[in-house]
Amino acid sequence: MHRLLIVFAIFIVASCTSANAPRPLLNEVPTPVSQLPRPTATIGPSPTTLPPLATVSTFDEAVTSTAGLNEIEQQLIALYQRAHLAVVSLDVVVDQSANLPPGHPPVSPDGLVGQGSGFLYDTQGHVVTNHHVVAGATNIQVRFANGATVLAELVGSDPDSDLAVIRLTNLPEGLEPLPLGDSGALQVGQTAVAIGSPFGEQNTLTVGVISGLGRTLRAPARSFGSFSIPNVIQTDAAINPGNSGGPLLNLRGEVIGVNTAIAVSLGGRDFEGVGYAVPASTVARVVPVLISQGRYDHPWLGISMTTVDTLFAQRFGLSIDRGVLIGAVQLGSPAAAAGLRGGTTSDTYRGLPVQLGGDVIIACNDEAVFSSDQLVGIIDRFQVGDQITLTIWRNNEPVTVPVTLAARP
């Protein structure tokens, strides 16, 4: 079973904790898996070297000349020859008995095998992939470009960024990790290259462009609401089941994102022209912590919210036509400690319930706020324990409120 998150409809937006606007669901390709507990213990230091495996050789030795090819073709060939050796295919075995009633015999002694992709992150044998690829894994097999396979162990996983790190038990000689690029410098229209194993077809390269920036995807739900993955890259480079966890590259061969989801029509599951990748900036922030601690704590504000625009303000008679309306404030949250106020009356907007009468956030650290997605992206730049200053609209005037961010529960 190929592993890939699928976005139903066009794309998905979400709030800091939960949202009061229409939000289609983000689902995995149907694969029965058990929930993988988030590691809480600190992972011990990795040894500086790993036992060598057979040297990975390239399959492109027959290509000795690029004569007659245009410049873009030559760039893509050179990129592939540099990068594809560091891109791996994952076979993931899960325990099918994990969700069966007590005493029920196992469905299969071999477990279910899912597939995904990943890429070598460093010379210590750490491989980056998606959380949803390895969730519920009892065994993880890594397959290299030359067909050689080794086992890997889970080092750390973060469902709220859909990132995970595994460590190879053996590292092939001569294998170089892929460098991270600067996803903050990306521009719409820039060439994007995906390498992975769609439908199990190993080391497949597809090409497109960056078709959007600053998108938001919904992360796994909590008992009290849902979080989201901000600043996501949108691309039209073909991404299909099995591509999850593989790199999205620029023409320099730098990782600018980790392929994680596609948008499909209701009932579909294959690529329709809109794919999503977790940005390299998130990888650079989260992965080192996963390696050292096994988990990552995201900053948390603790509110549900709705975007305020001109139509919303007109519909409910608000005195301000932009920002983020606070619907509810979580008990014990940073927002509650700072005295932020949630809604006091209920109504519906576009078929969904909305809480009215709360504070409207109009700026964060003097940066104007126009939408819930934007605020989620701003908060994501900070660390747990950082203090931010929110400017809110209350009683028809702006008020500044300091808030100290805590870790998501």
Image (cartoon, rainbow, N blue to C red):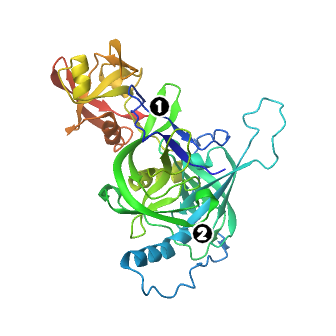
- In the image, taking residue 100 as reference, residue 305 lies left or right, namely left
What percent of the width, then of the height, locates residue 29?
A: 60, 44
What percent of the width, then of the height, locates residue 192?
A: 40, 62
Crowd rating for badge 1 (residues with CA inside 10 Å; few <14, some 14–19, many 20+): some
- Residue that mark 2 sits on: 49
- In the image, taking residue 222 as reference, residue 228 lies left or right, namely left
Crowd rating for badge 2 (residues with CA inside 10 Å; few <14, some 14–19, many 20+): few
Q: Quadrant of residue 33?
A: top right
Q: Quadrant of residue 186?
A: bottom left
What percent of the width, then of the height, locates residue 277?
A: 45, 52
Q: Residue at x 49, y 24 (%)?
A: 224
Label 1 SS: strand
> For the residue marked with disc 1, what is the amino acid?
Ser
Q: Residue at x 60, y 59 (%)?
A: 167
- Residue that mark 1 sits on: 226
Label 2 SS: loop
> For the residue marked with disc 2, what is the amino acid?
Thr
Which label's residue is closer to the chain start, 1 or 2?
A: 2
Q: Residue at x 59, y 52 (%)?
A: 155
> 396 or 265: nearer the eye?
265
